[in-house]
Amino acid sequence: MFDQAEKLRRISMGSVEPKSREQSDCRVVAVASGKGGVGKTNLVVNMSILLAQWGNQVIILDADLGLANVDVLLRVVPEYTIEDVLNGTKTLEEVILRGPLDIKIIPGGSGLFHLANLDQGRREQLIERLKYLEGEGNYLFIDSSAGISRNVLGFIGAADELIIVTTPEPTALADAYAMLKVVAETGCKSQAGLVVNCVQHLQQGERIYKRLKEVTGAYLDGMELTYLGEVYYDPVVSRAVQEGVPFVLSFPRSLAAASLTKVARRLAYRNLGSEAESRGGVGSFFTRLYQFVTNRRGRIVGS
C-alpha cells in the first residue's frame, strides 16, 4: 500500500486546473445525500472554493430547510433569508453573504417553498429578481437537506445536474441507492454523479461505485450513474471544521484537499451526455421549482 505522500503525488500529477466556463448560463448543481453525516455540505463548500480558485464565480444556495450548515462551516451569520426577498422586505443583494474568494451564499430557509403562495405577478417579478444571479456565477450549488423528502426532490428536479454523496458505511450506501431509486421513479433525473467520501484507499471508492452502478443498471431502468471520484478520510477535515476555515484553505496539501481537487476537475469537465443542453440557467431553475411546489400530486413536472 502506498504511503500518504505517494497517494498525494499520484492524485496531483499530470492535471491542469480547469478554467472558468465560457457560457452565459449558470450551471445549477443539486448536491444530495441519502442520509446525514456523510460530509455533503463540507464537500460543497470546499469544492466551491477550488472552483473559485480556478477563476469561476460560485454561488451556494443553502437549501437545508431543517438544519442549515453552510454558514456554520464558514462562520458567517445570516441576518436574512430568501424568504425576506419573497415578502419584499429585502433585495436579493441584501440577503447574499460573502465567503472566501467572494463565494456568494444565499440562506434559503423554508422561504423557497412559499413560492406556491405568490400570485402570478409577484412570482414573475421574483423570478426576474433571481435572474440577477445568472450574471453572478458560473456555478450555483444547491446544498439540500439529507434524505428523500418531497422538498429535496423538488430541488433535484429543478436543477440541471445531480451529485449524490455517500460514504463506505453500509447504511449510507443503502440510503444512496434508495435516493437513486426515488429519483428514477419520479423522473427527477436520468443521470447522477457519485462522490464517495471518507474512503481509506482508492480501490474502496471504485468498488462502491461499481457496486452501485451494477445494482442501478439492473433495477433502475433509465438511470445512468457516473463516477466523480472519492475523497480520502483525513483527520485535518475535522480540525478545519473546528477552526471554521475550509480544509482546502487551511490544509491545501492534505490528502483530503488533493483528492477533492480531482473530484472538482471531473465535475468541471464532466460530459453531461443527453443532459448537456442548456435548461436556461437560474431563471429556469426557480421556474421549475415553482412548478413543483404548486403541483398537488407531488410529481416532478417540467423535467
Image (cartoon, helix red, strand yellow):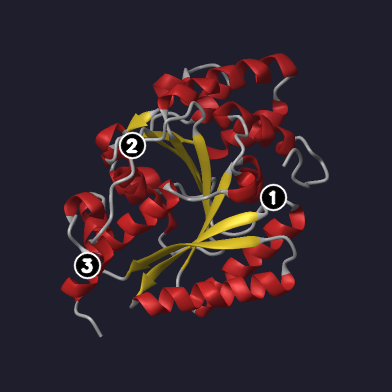
Question: 10 Å neighbourhood of mark 1: few (<14), some, or many (≥20)?
Answer: many
Residue at left 69%, top 50%? 188
In the image, what residue type sits under mark 2?
Answer: Val
Q: Quick one: SS at disc 3?
A: helix
Q: Quadrant of residue 96?
A: top left
Q: Nearer the viewer, mark 3 or mark 2?
A: 3
Mark count: 3
**Residue 149 in picture, x, y percent from top left:** 65, 54
Give the Cα separation between the discs numbered 2 and 1.
33 Å
Specify which label sits upstream in the sequence, 1 or 3: 3
Q: Are marks 1 and 3 in contact (CB under 8 Å)?
A: no
Q: Mark 2 sits on what residue?
A: 77
Give the Cα separation between the discs numbered 3 and 2.
35 Å
Q: Mark 3 sits on what residue?
A: 8
**Residue 196 in picture, x, y percent from top left:** 44, 67
- In this orientation, does residue 149 appear? yes
Q: Mark 1 sits on what residue?
A: 188
In the image, what residue type sits under mark 1?
Answer: Cys
Give the Cα separation between the discs numbered 1 and 3.
37 Å
Specify which label sits upstream in the sequence, 3 or 2: 3
Q: Quick one: SS at disc 2?
A: loop
Q: Quadrant of residue 51?
A: top left
- In this orientation, does residue 174 appear? no
Question: 10 Å neighbourhood of mark 2: few (<14), some, or many (≥20)?
Answer: few
**Residue 234 in picture, x, y percent from top left:** 26, 69
Give the residue at the far bottom of this rendering: 1
Residue at left 50%, top 76%? 208
In the image, what residue type sits under mark 3?
Answer: Leu
Specify which label sits upstream in the sequence, 2 or 1: 2
